[in-house]
């Protein structure tokens, strides 16, 4: 399929470990987003890229969280020194971006990575 | 401070009847609204959207209504089917023209159960 893919689907990390979560957006989508979803809550914005430029990282909860998209396609969300409160589902979404007019706002989500920190 | 609120955590309806899911927002800069459907262990799936220049958008069994003065939107599903059982999220965005970015602000979701 041509949807958004994420890997791994499940990750268990011991407190203090570093983790890296990968996102492959839909081909041709300019914008890429990361969201965090805690149990029983809606997704919450973390950060946003337009091509390789990180235009908004206001949602990153601490400096332990870092995201990159070096070639404007695949993105990696890295969490250093994981804590138990980092346990959540991390969702990646992509969209056409500003050039898509109103379609810019329709974001297509991957299946998510469920992170459990023990 | 929740900018997008879905006050009903759950809703149960009979197959064939109408399902109405509600959403309220507080930020007057929001000018684009979306509904997503989510099954367990999957990512949210885009369902339907509406721009603030409209008050209604229809796509098959799904209709979204927007009342800007009340800062309220609703999703109607007619007729409801058992396969519609899922969690529904309302989301909002402020466009670049409004000084926003493309990020979506989500409500907490409403779990819809359609009984056969």
Image (cartoon, helix red, strand yellow):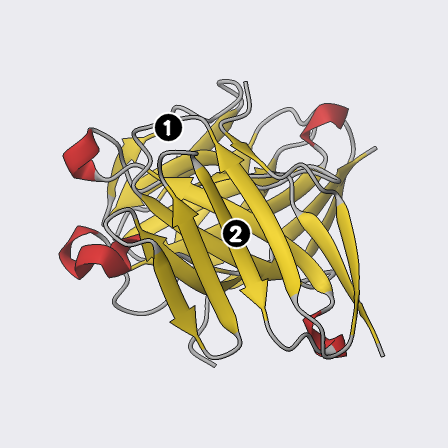
Task: Please name the residue that numbered disc 2 is placed on.
Answer: B74
Disc 2 packing (10 Å; few <14; some 14–19; many ≥20): some
Camera sees residue A44: no
Task: Please name the residue that numbered disc 1 is placed on.
Answer: A57
Whole-percent x and y of residue A81? Answer: 64, 24
Which is more toward the observer, B25 or A91?
B25
Chain under callout 1: A
Q: CA distance from mark 2 to mark 1?
A: 30 Å
Tag 2 near tag 1, CB within 8 Å: no
Image depth: mark 2 or mark 1 in front: 2
Asked if marks 2 and 1 fall on the same chain, the answer is no
Residue at 62%, 33% (x, y): give it.
A18
Direction from residue B29 to residue B92 in the image, left or right:
right
| Residue A94 lies in quadrant | bottom left
SS at mark 1 in the image: loop
Direction from residue A41 to residue A71 in the image, left or right:
left
| Residue A28 lies in quadrant | bottom left
Whole-percent x and y of residue B38? Answer: 64, 60
């Amino acid at each position: 399929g041509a949807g958004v893919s994420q890997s791994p689907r499940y990750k268990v990390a011991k407190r203090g470990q570093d983790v890296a979560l990968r996102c492959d957006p839909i081909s041709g989508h300019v914008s890429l987003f990361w969201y965090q979803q805690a149990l029983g809550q809606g997704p919450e914005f973390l950060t946003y890229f337009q091509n390789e430029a990180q235009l908004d990282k206001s949602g990153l909860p601490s400096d332990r969280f870092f995201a990159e998209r070096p070639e404007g396609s695949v993105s990696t969300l890295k969490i250093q020194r994981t804590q138990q409160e980092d346990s959540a589902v991390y969702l990646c979404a992509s969209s056409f971006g500003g050039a898509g007019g109103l379609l810019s706002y329709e974001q297509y989500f991957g299946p998510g990575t469920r992170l459990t920190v023990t | 401070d929740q900018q997008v609120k879905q006050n009903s955590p759950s809703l149960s309806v009979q197959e064939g009847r109408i399902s109405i899911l509600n959403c309220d927002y507080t930020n007057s800069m929001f000018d684009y609204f979306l509904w997503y459907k989510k099954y367990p262990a999957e990512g949210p799936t885009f369902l339907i959207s509406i721009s603030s220049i409209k008050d209604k958008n229809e796509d098959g069994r799904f209709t979204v209504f927007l009342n800007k003065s009340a800062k309220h939107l609703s999703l109607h599903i007619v007729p409801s089917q058992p396969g519609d059982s899922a969690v529904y999220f309302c989301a909002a965005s402020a466009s670049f023209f409004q000084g926003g970015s493309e990020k979506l602000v989500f409500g907490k979701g409403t779990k819809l159960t359609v009984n056969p």
